[in-house]
Amino acid sequence: MAKRILAWNEGAGQFYREIGKKPNGRPARIYLGADEALAGVNVARLVALWGAVEERWGHWDQNQMADDPFPCWDDVTLTLARAVGKGQWSVTVEPPDDGPQEVAAWLATLRSYFPMVRADVADPAAAEEGSQRLKEVWQEEAGRQEATHAREMRNIKDNAAPFGGKVATRETLHDALDAYKAWTEKSSVDIGGVTTQSGKKQGERAARIRRYAKDVPLSDFGIDEIDAVIEFWRTRPRKPPTKKTPSGSPYAFTLCKHTIRLFKHFLRWLHKEKSFPWRKPADLDLDRTKIVPDAETRYKIDTYGKEELGLLWQHASLFERKLLLLALNCGFSISEIGSLDWSEVDGGFVKGPRPKTKVYGEFKLWDMTRQALGTPKKTGPVFLTAGGSSLIARTEGNNVCAKIPAAWYRLLNRVGKHHKGFKRLGFHHLRKTAGNEVRKLADGETMGVFLRHGKPVKSDSLAGLYSNPVFPRVFEAQDRLWEFWKDIFTPLEDVELPRKTTPEQIRQIRRLKKQGVQTKKLAEMFGVCADTIRVYCRKK
């Protein structure tokens, strides 16, 4: 049994402790320093270390792996013990003369048994390489075991099916949806191997299906369960409640349509995927699904009128005015503006394909639009963020930069503050507004060429294969657009944003405050924070 007292060595000038046994049966002397308080702390760790040595020997002896007839210190554990005696929390030890994988396994075992002091090796890179390789080996082994299990379960199910037998599987619907989500994000990548926005969107839809679908073993996932999932989305379930909609509004028609389409693709993928023992039921019939429509049918698109465009221009900053000009002049939306390159700007024209449809188009720039683009360059994005990246460049989280949508909704908030009830439409509705006016001033084919649609002539799907678009008609329509809208555009850089609170409103706030109206009430009345009210009331 180990002693429970500290001894003092005059020659060494240190406290010490004799604990455990060496292979020769004699106790090991561990020096603990001259500070009695620290020595007491280190002794507790030393006792725990010796207990771990005894525990390890017990495991080895049980498995007939012990080289010694009793638990004792070896060179490595003595190195750990002396490091503990010095108050150290890590120490470099000499590994066995083996390969990186063996060293990594040995080091992992050592750290598992002796957590009271961290053992390191002189070449940590080699140990890390071995750990990584071991991880890959066990992952490969896990994959082989999973594949073997899936194959055996598939064979058992196939053998039992003709006799009416049903075999329960451990794989569940949620497991399959998780695997499908990972497969979708891995297969939908760009040239750089990064998941595309389409892949992310598909993964989000798969996660949404999983969130609402009941988890069942795949052996129980039959026609009734499939129909239940489709019926759930066909009837457009309600979203989780929020502050604005406590009861939750129904999911959009388009979202439910795309969700059902993805679920049907998931079923086809699951039928072919060898890692899951599931087969599509023979009598499953995936017919066309009719989604519950909106209560009100829309007969026309939402666009902005001339007066509304004038209000937007009046309240816009310089950057927001540039966005307005490109959207109205060329029918550009977020992706077109963000990807616009100087190589596509040819004097007073913009020539290039649309990012979404890859359809080529040409546009005549208004004089004010050319001014908004700035000094021409040979190549490079026309618009850059403060950090020098594109307006649609991906963030570190692989999300598209929201610079343009954020600027647009700031503008709508600014306009809505001074003009209650102003329409809040998405930025792409400016593109619809421009296309709608081009159709009025010219014709439908010119509008299709202006918007760079894949099939501008709806009555002849092969027109684009046997003839070129008539861009001069587009230029003429753009000139007419300028004549129609030019009186709403003040000089580009003559920006004077309206004040959040007018002088008359400030005087009214002071009068109401003198009458005893509470600050919180005034803040609600005028749409500002309470601190702003206090500042206005302090002014003379």
Image: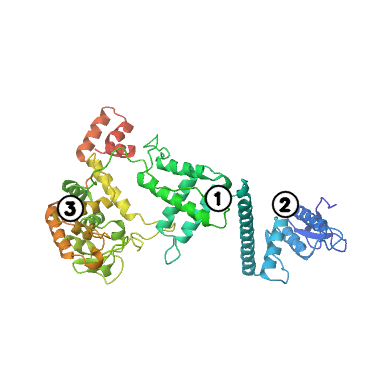
C-alpha distance separating marks 3 and 2: 83 Å
Q: Quadrant of residue 332?
A: bottom left
Residue 271 lies, with reference to residue 217, above or below; the image says below
**CA neighbours of label 1 inside 10 A, class few (<14), some (14 to 19), many (20+):** some
Give the image location of residue 202, x and y in percent.
Answer: 43, 53
Which of the two discs, 3 and 2, sits closer to the camera? 3
Identified by mark 3, the residue type is Glu
- Asked if marks 3 and 1 touch (Cβ < 8 Å), the reply is no
Give the image location of residue 402, x and y in percent.
Answer: 35, 54
**Which residue in the protein does label 3 denote?**
437
Mark 3 lies on a secondary structure that is helix
Which of the two discs, 1 and 2, sits closer to the camera? 1
Q: In the drawing, what numbered circle is on residue 41? A: 2
**Which residue in the protein does label 1 denote?**
175
Which sits earlier in the primary sequence, circle 3 or circle 2?
2
C-alpha distance separating marks 1 and 2: 49 Å
